[in-house]
Image (spheres, rainbow, N blue to C red):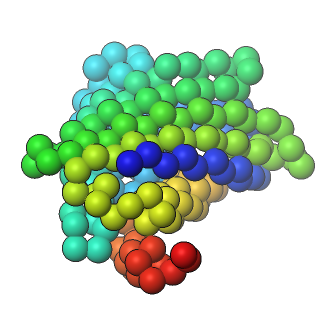
């Protein structure tokens, strides 16, 4: 099951500050709900975990994040994540491309992400996974903005929003 998400968001910080934060795995991982880094393999590869609960299904993925590109001059980045369900019943792959541009005294962040999920979570279907992925990404954006502003970030997954996504996916849009 594959879904594609494209998002644009604005932060009220310089492009250099935004870039430095977004491309620093130790800083940005705390903005991703349910995610932790477990080790650094080398400058471009990091081991980590992501734990999600969608409705009755709880999944924990152990995987590798690889920066394929981090071009500070053009403020363009690309990364890939590959993970295996810790119970061995599925996996997830993610490819993300990002581009930063100066806009309105701050920075505009454009992100395109393709997520492929197999196993238990894939049973929910692409519409539901798309809704949940959007909610997790929105929580990431809020955390990222708070981190840049020096405020506290919420590292726990907002279970209420995810459950809303499950209900919306099951009974919502046709």
Which quarter of the figure is the C terminus placed in? bottom right
At x 31% / y 55%, what residue is drawn? Answer: 122
Instruction: Locate residue 34, reporting x and y percent.
Output: 33, 56
Up/down of 98 relative to 32, above or below = above
- The residue closer to the viewer here, 44 or 13, is 44
Q: Is residue 111 left or right of residue 139?
A: right
Nearer to the camera, 78 or 41: 78
User: At 49% from the left edge and 49% from the top edge, which residue is drawn?
Assistant: 3
Count of numbered tags? 0
Instruction: Give above or below for 163 relative to 4.
Output: below
Residue 90: % across, % down: 21, 45
**Residue 91 rendering spot, x and y as whole percentages:** 25, 42
Q: Nearer the viewer, residue 57 or 98?
A: 57
Q: Is residue 163 visible?
A: yes
Taking the view exactly as shown, the residue that stands out farthest to the left is 87
The residue furthest front is 174
Residue appearing at x 44%, y 58% in the figure: 126
Q: What is the quadrant of residue 70 in the picture?
A: top right
* Residue situated in front as seen by the camera: 74 or 7: 7
- Residue under the point 54% across and 46% down: 4
Q: Is residue 151 in view?
A: no
The correct choice, above or below, for 71 with respect to 81 in the image is above
Task: Please give left or right for residue 104 compared with residue 89 in the image.
Answer: right
Residue 22 on image: x %, y %: 57, 38
């Amino acid at each position: 099951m594959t879904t594609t998400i494209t998002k644009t968001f604005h932060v009220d910080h310089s492009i250099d500050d935004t870039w430095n934060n977004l491309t620093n795995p130790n800083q940005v991982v705390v903005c991703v709900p349910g995610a932790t880094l477990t080790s650094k393999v080398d400058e471009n590869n990091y081991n980590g975990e992501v734990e999600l609960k969608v409705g009755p299904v709880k999944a924990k993925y152990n995987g590798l994040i690889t920066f394929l590109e981090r071009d500070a001059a053009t403020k363009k980045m690309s990364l890939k994540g590959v993970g295996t369900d810790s119970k061995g019943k599925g996996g997830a792959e993610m490819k993300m491309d990002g581009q930063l541009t100066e806009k309105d005294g701050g920075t505009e962040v454009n992100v395109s992400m393709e997520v492929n999920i197999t196993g238990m979570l894939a049973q929910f279907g692409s519409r539901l996974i798309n809704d949940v992925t959007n909610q997790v990404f929105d929580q990431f954006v809020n955390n990222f903005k708070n981190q840049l502003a020096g405020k506290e970030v919420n590292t726990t997954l907002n279970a209420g929003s995810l459950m809303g996504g499950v209900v919306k996916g099951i009974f919502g849009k046709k």
